[in-house]
Image: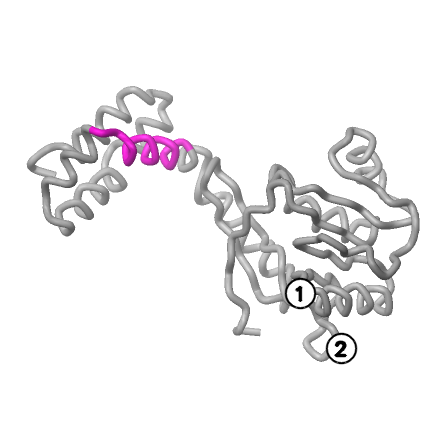
Amino acid sequence: MTRWVPLAVDLAGRRVVCVGGGPVAAGKLASLEGSGAAVTLVAPDLTCDLAERVAAGGIAHEARGYAAGDLDGAALAIAATASAEVNDAVAAEAAAAGVLCVRADAAPDAAHPGDAGLMAAVRRGPVSLAVSTSGTSPALATRLRDELAARYDAAYGELAVLLGELRADPAVRAALDAVPSAERRARWQAVLDGATLPLIRGGDRQSAREEAISCLCSSSG
């Protein structure tokens, strides 16, 4: 399983087909919230949570069992039914069509185990902290995700936004372009190690910005 490679994918506007409408499917689709993916559920019945999401217009629903061809045009397939036979058929179709497939019940020795996984993730604005055990232990992945969530609060998302703004600021870019690369790295590190993050936590974003600019543009770094 160590052959699996962590990969972030932009699914905005792309077709994702989830076969299954139970709690496992709901959990998998929760990882896609906010992604902008065009999600279609294929299942005769849905959990209350998924039914509410369908009613709200967030996802499409085909109220029937899986049929060959359901993955046409998909960028990602999720096989999350209670039937190993159905999940295997979904994964087989995905493999034949070159569609990445997350198989919820996959075992390493399954005929078609799938070739993708949805990581346990913590999102802080543009920052994503994701954990994968390559399918060996969802419980451990969840535990590690929860530890990351406790360690990295919402201020890190605000910090990432601020640093992105400063990277694009012409004055900051000019100041950094004028020094060697080692000095540039030291200045960014000074931002991360200094008072910028505590100021953000304190709600003083203007002072945080000024502190960061001072670190990046000062000749003393």
Q: What residue type is labelled 2?
A: Ala
Q: Nearer the viewer, residue 1 or 7?
A: 7
Q: What residue type is labelled 1?
A: Gly
Identity of the residue drawn at 67% across and 61% down? 99
x and y percentages locating residue 206 in the rendered image? 29, 20
x and y percentages locating residue 144 in the rendered image? 53, 55
List the residue tagged with mark 2: 111
Find residue 63 and report its image quarter.
top right
In the shown orientation, is residue 28 left or right of residue 195?
right
Find residue 169 and report its image quarter.
top left
Identity of the residue drawn at 73% across and 69% down? 96
Regarding mark 1 in the picture, which secondary structure is present there?
loop
Front disc: 2 or 1: 1
Whether 164 is among the magenta residues is: yes
The image shows residue 59, relative to residue 6, as above or below, that is above
**Residue range corresponding to the magenta coloring:** 158-170
List the residue tagged with mark 1: 98
Regarding mark 2 in the picture, which secondary structure is present there?
loop
